[in-house]
Image (cartoon, rainbow, N blue to C red):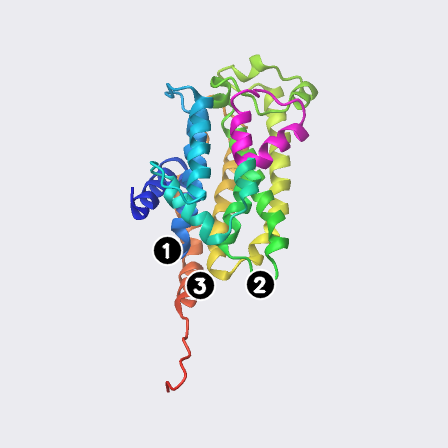
Amino acid sequence: MTLTASYEACRRLHARFGRSYYLATMLLPAWKRRHVHALYGFARYADEIVDAFDMKDDRAAALDRLADRLWASLAGEPVDDHVLPAFTHTVRSFGVDYGDIDAFLRSMRADLSVRRYATYDDLLVYMEGSAAVIGTMVLPVLEPLPGLARRAREPARQLGLAFQLTNFLRDVREDLARDRVYLPEADMARFGVTEADLARPRVCPRLRDLLAFEAGRAREHYRAALAGIEMLTPSSRPCVRAAYELYGGILDEMEKAGFEVLARRVRVPRRRRLAVFTRHLIAASAANRADRRVRVEVPGWA
């Protein structure tokens, strides 16, 4: 697997499984875009080992083999894998924190044995590895402004949490089919919701109230993430703004549908997705042109 082919494999994974975020990444300069694809492709690759309905192998063993190949690749050893060459190249190019990678793998392993979460704090521990660190891994590719890299980490974490909590609320039915419930048990008890309510064909009033409550939590994470956009280099801002609006739009659509997430998968309408993309395209084009205008000063040149 050549490095170019590996980046293309990651791009295809991103295009297939991350439609909203993939659309947003089209606003990035091409050189940044492929690195985001590599990070997303690796995360999705591991997630599919854990979640895919048609996975026949022992999931724990398959995840261990992926981890072994990953650390070998990061140590400079050649590995037979279609995603890891691009991921390793990106990690090395941007100094991605190995601790973030390890935290991600721990959360993936947790998904194989932990099926319920007692409190929201317990869920946050899981989401730290499964979502917050995705934000911090992508952060160096998005280029925080000089002196702001440390301050930008917390908004990046918060955006990862916001995106994942949005997914959890949208995917209640799919997660239950995998015998996973990401709605905290304490919150379910507070609103009088049982797992039998999650298996119904339609959302009952108790579950609707619970989902609205959790959506409020997601919006708090979005608000905490917002200031981080201005901490990024201008060529990265349109992409992150678009992703922010598209994922936030999933919450909007759930609210408009009365949080009816059991009968169908809530999506942002194609017209709205294209409108968000188009609205940020002009700013992205201008920023990307400025990104390319690098004047090289050579002594002796006029």
Q: Which residue is mark 2?
A: 146
Q: Position of residue 92 (x, y in %)?
A: 46, 50
Q: Position of residue 28 (x, y in %)?
A: 42, 54
Q: Which residue is mark 1?
A: 30
Q: Please tell me which residue lies in front, 26 or 198.
A: 26
Q: Position of residue 18 (x, y in %)?
A: 41, 38
Q: Quadrant of the N terminus?
A: top left
Q: Which residue is mark 3?
A: 287
Name the mark nearer the viewer: 2 or 1: 2
Sort mark 3 into few (<14), some (14-19) or many (20+) by Cα contacts within 10 Å: many
Describe the element under mark 3 as helix, strand or loop.
Answer: helix
Does the magenta portion include 105? yes
State the residue at coordinates (42%, 25%): 62
How far apart are the alpha carbons under marks 3 and 1?
Answer: 12 Å
How far apart are the alpha carbons under marks 3 and 2?
Answer: 17 Å
- Residue 264 in view here: no
